[in-house]
Amino acid sequence: MIPPPSARPFLDQAGWAGAEILPLAGDASFRRYFRVVEGDRRAILMDAPPPHEDPRPFISVGEWLCESGFAAPAILARDLTQGLVLLEDFGDARVREHLDAAPAEEMAIYTRAVDLLVDLHEQPAQSGLAPYDRAVYQREAALLTEWFAPAAGLAVDASGYTTAWDKVLPIAEQDVAPVVTVLRDYHAENIMLLPDHARSHGLGLLDFQDALAGHPAYDLVSLLQDARRDVSPAVEQAMLAHYQTRAKASPDFEAAYAVLGAQRNAKIIGIFTRLWKRDGKPRYLDFLPRMWGLLERDLAHPALAPVADWFAENVPASARGQLDAGQSAQ
């Protein structure tokens, strides 16, 4: 976590000459983050190096969120050629760590997070966002057959998998829910506690550069079926009901929620396997048992019967869980 050589001149030009640059935890992408400290001032430096990363979508969505009344980090300086962006620092009070220390607040904080989604979904989708459509759903779901299946030593019916999804995805596509801005990674590790931001329910948003225009259930699934944190089934059901009441959701909303939950969880199983096999990051395998548990809960919904049948025929129960990290990542 050494800053790129371009970081110092970038900060000097941005008015942060002499500031200390401290590493922060990265994520599953090529992006890296650093805290910039100068006296009482704090900022976050995003290193999104081209050609692997492009910070422009993050900037565009972040500015739209702020204009719409939500709390996204303000852009303090940018150098798109170098892939450097200086951001407002939201501090260290992430929802994940807060709830680890104060689990009794889970219901209250998740209620605020769901209320934020309701407010977000009352806005028309950001202009210019690409659609979260059938092609994207299928491409993402296929990550399971492309990466997990061979890693688990399974010879599966990939074309039958696509056909099964084609039978269930119309449930989400034909729902009368509005097309909204889908942040796509809305969960406890990307939500900050910001008491001074009352308009956004005291919550700050991170990691939204992959936003698309799609179904409102997707971000609700991302929040309540968290890949990195166990959300109790009681909280999930209460928050699903709370969202439906506040948003006046359609009768098909719960079926769409299950379909998009299964699609997202299948995708993440594939992504986490790829992070191990291709990128040499075996720690992501630790999340697979949780992901399979979430996927099986979604597959139990009657709307998912064709996909559930495919899994029953192609992925035995013994293969649904942890992979052997001792295998060579390649």
Image (spheres, grey):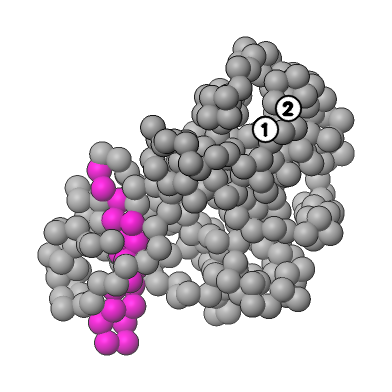
Depth check: give the residue in front, 83 or 153.
153
Q: Quadrant of the N terminus?
A: bottom left
Instruction: Say what secondary structure mark 1 lies in.
Output: helix
- Tell me, yes or no, whether the highlighted magenta stretch contains residue 37: yes
Badges 2 and 1: C-beta atoms under 8 Å apart?
Answer: yes
Report the Cα–Cα distance between label 2 and label 1. 6 Å
Residue at the image position 63 percent from the left and 17 percent from the top: 156
In the displayed structure, 218 sits above or below 106; it is above
Q: Which residue is at the far bottom?
A: 39
Image location (x, y in percent) of residue 199:
60, 70
In the rendered image, residue 50, in percent from the top left (x then y), is placed at 25, 43
Q: Is residue 35 above or below residue 275?
A: below
Span colored in magenta: 32-50
Look at label 1 and name its amino acid: Ala
Q: Is residue 213 left or right of residue 256?
A: left
Residue 115 image-quadrant placement: bottom right
Name the residue beneath numbered marker 2.
316
* Majority SS type along the magenta span: strand
